[in-house]
Image: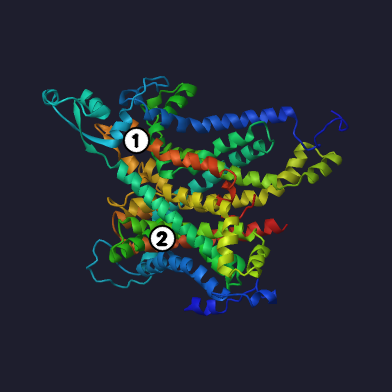
Amino acid sequence: MTSATTAHSVVEPSATTRRFAGSLVVLYAIITMIPLVWIMLTAFKSPDDAISYPPKVMFKPSLEGFCNLFTTRSRQTPEFIRSLGPPQGLCDSIARSRNMVVAGPSNYVPRFINSLIIAFGSTVLAVALGTLSAYGFSRFRVPLKDDLLFFILSTRMMPPIAVAIPIYLMYRTIGLSDTRLGMILLYTSVNVSLAVWLLKGFIDEIPREYEEAAMIDGYTRFQAFVKVVLPQATTGIAATAIFCLIFAWNEYAFAVLLTSGNAQTAPPFIPIIIGEGGQDWPAVAAGTALFLVPIVVFTVLLRKHLLRGITFGAVRK
Amino acid sequence: MNELSASSRITYRAVMVRPGVARRIRGLSDRTLAWLFITPTIVLLLAINIFPLLWTIYLSFTNYRANRANVPTIWLGADWYQSILTDPDIWAAMQVTAHFVIWTVVIETVLGFGLAYLIDKKFRGHGLWTTIILLPMMLSPAVVGNFWTFLYQPQIGLFNYVVAFFTGRAASSFQMLGDVTLSPWAIVIVDAWMWTPYVMLICLAGLRSIPDYIYEAAEVDRASKWRQFWSITLPMALPFIMLAVLFRGIENFKMFDMVNLLTGGGPGSTTEVASITLKRAAFESWRTGYSSAFAIILFVTVFGLANIYVKALNKVKSR
């Protein structure tokens, strides 16, 4: 190929190179997806299909995993079950086919709701505090600015378990242990460092002249912040919010050490879903699959901002 | 107190440059506003990060046990530090941790850089496949650990089936989570599966930051592709690779979630990383003072290593 006839620059990879690179990446992507696809499939298997060997790729779909996830069941004699009226809904009829009756709802829904409340609560707080601080650091001459920013970042270097002990003691003293509020405050404090760093990057990119112009038009500094800077920073704020949400949604160490019943989120709960005779894999898979859905959606929404979020904005894209 | 004196020195700047604007300012002054904006974050961090850290330091010098709050607290001095630093079990746990950090970081860096290099060739559909590759790192490490225990089941697990299929061994003849030689690798595999995309993403940013004209100049000089890779691509992407190594190193030093779910530190203590030892001491045997001292030692180690590393990173960057 002579350079005179090529439309693209000399550094563009050739078609063969691209195809070769592409097939290797696609191969890796497929291998990486197998565990996720497998867990999604397992959620729709019957307990027998889930533990069959060799593993079954083709199977008759069943909702038993989801039923077992959402209900608790008790074993009864066939005579007793026959004496009952018609089954109450799908899950009851599945349970009865295994000589059980539905005894009540499981704890998955309350745990899931805790996850929602704690993740969204701490995200709203962290983003609100983070936006204010980021604006403060971006626009005002704050003494010891670099030291404060580094201090904020360094709070993330601590192993969670190192601070879990005194937080446990402190929460026990002031009555915040095993409460949603306590977990919201804790996750907010972890997330706020990320929020400040990310949002400072986004706000730094908004020209100061916009606010100055608004202030010439008679806005106060605060009005200029609310009416000019905030709308400009919307994408950055949204991206930051999703990162905070993902962290709070996925957090495990604090949740398992500091909550027991009341405020426990889904990550410590999913592994302890036990069926009769050991772990009920379809139910665990169903719980996992439902738990993963929001994250998968957010990842797709976030892909453009991912890099900033995972590096605290240390790498700009 | 420090904050108060600090905030009183906050000056405003954007407004001062245009005298016409200053007269028009109504409501809060910039100084007050800056103070109002920054303080809540600092207060929260002091309350939920710094105060507990100071408390940990205090507890590390006492015999306090969280499950026996009535026993009078005795000041022990540096006794715990001495016993931890001379305890062979602790050194074993630190070694296990170091092995995990080294192996996971090496594997993730090689794979991640390789993937980034391939994706940078901009083949058709690279955006979609990149997003798919990124999925694992967005998941909860605990939930990931949990579903990998299912894949690793010797009788029914997909992982064992696939390995058995390709090697011809019986699937139930090896227990990824129960065998002393295999279980550390079981964790390394899951960690690499989950976090290679992270390294890949940072490396990709590094590769994209290399301007085309450098390669064009190299082409004019007839440098081979191999030579271009070693003399341009790798050195220019190096600061980014090092940044990825730093972040993964810090995270994996703190590794807890996945290990706790996959093996809980076993079999024996072959996968007992520092965080697991710490959790056992703090929340199972309730040796609060002892575990506080260990927590401080860990924190100082991470902080010290990270600082040394950042100095090296800055040197590479400024080259």
Q: Which disc number belongs to residue B295?
A: 2
In this rendering, do the residues under marks 1 and 2 share a single chain? Answer: no
Quick check: can you spot residue B265? no
Q: Secondary structure at mark 2?
A: helix
- Res B278 → quadrant: bottom left
Mark 1 highlights which residue?
A: A284
Q: CA distance from mark 1 to mark 2?
A: 33 Å
| Residue toward you, B205 or B12 | B12
Residue positioned 47% across, 39% down in the render: B190
Q: Which residue, as the protein is rendered here, is positioned at the far right?
A: A4
Residue positioned 54% across, 72% down in the render: B33
Indicate whether B200 appears above or below B26.
above
- Res B159 → quadrant: top left
Q: Amino acid at mark 1?
A: Val
- Res A61 → quadrant: top left
Chain assignment, label 2: B
Q: Return the x and y of residue A235 as percentages of the image width and height.
A: 57, 51
| Residue toward you, A49 or B17 | B17
- Categorize mark 2 by other alpha carbons within 10 Å: few (<14), some (14-19), many (20+): many
Q: Return the x and y of residue A207 as percentages of the image width and height.
A: 67, 61
Chain assignment, label 1: A
Q: Which residue, as the protein is rendered here, is positioned at the far front?
A: A217
Q: Return the x and y of residue B108 as percentages of the image width and height.
A: 56, 42
Q: Nearer the viewer, mark 1 or mark 2?
A: 1
Residue positioned 67% across, 66% down in the render: A213
